[in-house]
């Protein structure tokens, strides 16, 4: 599969997934300026690298949009314990399929970014955690890592400096929850993937109790781009408070689904109609999930003016999440959609916190009643009540992720639920 | 139980982690790749190899969906039915496979040739509907493509 290719839509010249054949090969990557960013970083002081990332205003691409430079600055400068980097490639949020493109088409930008991050934060070991289902992509990335070792970019005394670092791929085994950062660390430690209570935060007490930073694959892949072009250039791409290139995945009812690299802040409707080729049969858009299944669903008639960045989507009552847009046309059964999403969170709840363990199952069961026209009118409020009692009451954000789609679906499409309610005897006149 | 080359890999990996417990998932993967699934005996073996209590290994094995507790069919077909695939017709795809193989999702055929399961999003939303057999993804599925695939595997 090739990365989704688009022409004449924007003047954006792709940098994360550049339009260069065989770019995944180390010699092609090297011939196109690859590993120059690492050389540049190694000639700087670690704090200067962190400062560069801070000033670039890069925000995490894993869903929370946390400022990356700020996260890096939380790491203690003087630690008698080793420090660790975890690169999060668990990519399991329904509607999200972007990190996979990086593993396949530009693995060296990820490796280079990982090394720069290790240098900046004083780490000698990085673990790239990849979901177990991506066996094929694990092999592709491992090949790239092996090549980088052979070329002296990873390992002892990198490029003749005092900096040494190892990169190890850690394969997950099919648990969505392991994309949650503390659960990911427990999984690497060889435990069940239960999320940890925070605080303490990973920068104080992470992997094996040592200071740890966890960054998403796409976030780390932006680092060499920033180092090569400078923070001034980077911070001016796209949305001011959320700048840079963004890998946007579009799936569902569109003619040309795929992953598109574009500056942040592109209009949502333009992404759907121009980049992704519009809705088949020119049907109306009924609903859009803008950033992966856990983000709040939007009505098709409220999309005008919404842009793909953190502030615009927040103002619209949703979030940019992992930028995985799911488009639903006018014939879509939204009750079936929300039942399927609820089923997913029920399946993936780790079972540690009662509101999530029990609540996700209840929501799933009630939504099945709606799907089969067996629900009562009161079930709409009951559903909302359960969602409200999960939200904010769990150790990790999976509870919120399960609650938000249900809450937003009821708020924005209450009529869909009402249509599925059993007619009461009273109204039937019996 | 682990092959010599896998045991060598374990030794190499030990250098990458400060604890032997961190090798639980890598070792379980090696066992599954070698044996097809992870038996109770294998779990005990992994515990002894890494000096970890059996109960801990059992806890890990039962947590992760991809670790198989019992033998699966020769072709382990995983059909994604999550939202993006559902919107693009994964329901029909699953139904067609069920009909062709004569088994329902969650079942293994009597001749142990097929195991069919419904799975959560596999990160293939742009090429939906899709299914996976082992590490191989089959994308942009149609009924015709499925017929060809199943004919080839039969």
Image (cartoon, grey):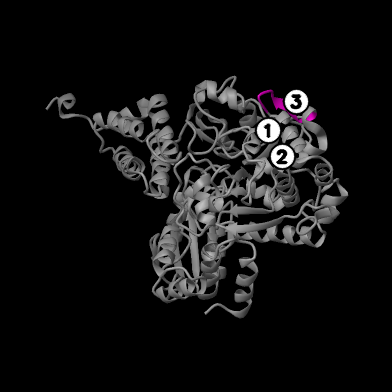
Question: Can residue A34 be seen from the camera position used here?
Answer: no
Span shown in magenta: A233-242
Q: Position of residue B65 (x, y in %)?
A: 45, 58
Question: Can residue A293 be seen from the camera position used here?
Answer: yes
The image quadrant that residue B14 belongs to is bottom right
Numbered mark located on residue A89 in the image:
none
The image quadrant that residue A148 belongs to is bottom right
Q: Nearer the viewer, residue B4 or A302?
A: B4
Task: Please give the chain letter of the residue carrying mark 3.
Answer: A
Q: Position of residue A29 (x, y in %)?
A: 82, 50
Tag 1 near tag 2, CB within 8 Å:
yes
A421, above or below B70, in the image: above
Q: Which residue is mark 2?
A: A222
A156, above or below A39, in the image: below
Q: Give the class, few, some or many, for how many residues have Cα within 10 Å of label 1's Cα (few <14, many ≥20).
A: many
Q: CA distance from mark 3 to mark 2?
A: 14 Å
Numbered mark located on residue A236 in the image:
3
Q: Position of residue A412 (x, y in %)?
A: 42, 25
Q: CA distance from mark 1 to mark 3?
A: 11 Å
Q: Which residue is mark 1?
A: A58
Element at label 3: loop
Q: Residue at x 81, y 43 (%)?
A: A37
Q: Position of residue A125 (x, y in %)?
A: 67, 54
- Looking at the image, is mark 1 or mark 2 earlier in the sequence? 1
Q: In this image, A290 relative to A32: left or right?
A: left
Q: Quadrant of the C terminus of chain A?
A: top left
Element at label 1: loop
């Amino acid at each position: 599969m090739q990365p989704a290719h688009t022409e004449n839509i924007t003047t954006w010249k792709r940098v994360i997934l550049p339009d260069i054949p065989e770019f995944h090969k180390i010699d092609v990557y090297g011939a196109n300026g690859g590993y120059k960013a690492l050389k540049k970083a190694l000639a700087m002081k670690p704090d200067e690298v962190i400062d560069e990332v801070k000033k670039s205003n890069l925000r995490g691409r894993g869903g929370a949009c946390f400022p990356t430079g700020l996260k890096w600055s939380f790491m203690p400068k003087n630690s008698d314990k080793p420090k660790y980097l975890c690169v999060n490639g668990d990519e399991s949020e329904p509607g999200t399929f972007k990190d996979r493109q990086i593993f396949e088409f530009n693995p060296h930008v990820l490796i280079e970014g990982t090394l720069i991050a290790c240098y900046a934060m004083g780490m000698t070991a990085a673990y790239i955690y990849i979901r177990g289902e991506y066996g094929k992509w694990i092999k592709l990335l491992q090949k790239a890592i092996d090549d980088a070792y052979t070329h002296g970019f990873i390992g002892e005394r990198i490029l003749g400096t005092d900096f040494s670092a190892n990169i190890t791929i850690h394969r997950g085994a099919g648990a969505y929850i392991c994309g949650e950062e503390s659960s990911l660390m427990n999984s690497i430690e060889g435990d069940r993937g239960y999320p940890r209570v925070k605080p303490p935060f990973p920068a104080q007490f992470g992997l094996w109790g040592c200071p740890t930073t966890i960054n998403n694959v796409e976030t780390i892949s932006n680092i060499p781009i920033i180092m090569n072009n400078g923070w001034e250039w980077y911070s001016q791409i796209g949305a001011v408070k959320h700048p840079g290139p963004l890998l946007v995945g579009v799936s569902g009812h569109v003619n040309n689904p795929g992953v598109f690299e574009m500056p942040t802040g592109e209009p949502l409707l333009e992404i759907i109609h121009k980049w992704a080729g519009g809705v088949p049969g020119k049907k109306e858009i009924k609903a859009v999930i803008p950033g992966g299944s856990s983000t709040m669903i939007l009505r098709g008639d409220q999309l005008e003016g919404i842009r793909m960045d953190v502030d615009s989507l927040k103002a619209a009552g949703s979030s940019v999440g992992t930028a995985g847009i799911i488009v639903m046309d006018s014939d879509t059964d939204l009750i079936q959609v929300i039942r399927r999403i609820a089923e997913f969170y029920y399946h993936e709840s780790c079972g540690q916190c009662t509101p999530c363990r029990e609540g996700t199952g209840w929501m799933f069961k009630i939504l099945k009643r709606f799907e089969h026209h067996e629900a009562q009118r009161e079930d709409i409020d009951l559903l909302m009540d359960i969602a409200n009692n999960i939200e904010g009451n769990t150790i990790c954000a999976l509870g919120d992720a399960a609650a938000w789609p249900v809450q937003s679906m009821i708020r924005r499409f209450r009529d869909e639920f009402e249509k599925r309610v059993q007619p009461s005897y009273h109204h039937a006149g019996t | 139980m682990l092959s010599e080359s896998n045991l060598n890999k374990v030794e190499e990996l030990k250098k990458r982690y400060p604890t032997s417990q961190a090798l639980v998932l890598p070792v379980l993967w090696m066992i599954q790749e070698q044996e097809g699934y992870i038996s109770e005996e294998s779990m005990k073996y992994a515990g002894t190899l890494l000096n970890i209590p059996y109960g801990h290994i059992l806890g890990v094995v039962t947590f992760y969906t991809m670790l198989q507790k019992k033998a699966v069919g020769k072709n382990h077909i995983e059909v994604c039915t999550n939202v993006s695939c559902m919107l693009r017709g994964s329901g029909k795809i699953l139904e067609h496979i069920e009909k062709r193989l004569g088994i329902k999702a969650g079942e293994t055929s009597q001749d142990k040739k097929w195991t069919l399961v419904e799975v959560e999003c596999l990160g293939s939303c742009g090429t939906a509907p899709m299914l996976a057999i082992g590490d191989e993804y089959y994308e942009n599925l149609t009924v015709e493509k499925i017929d060809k695939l199943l004919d080839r595997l039969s």
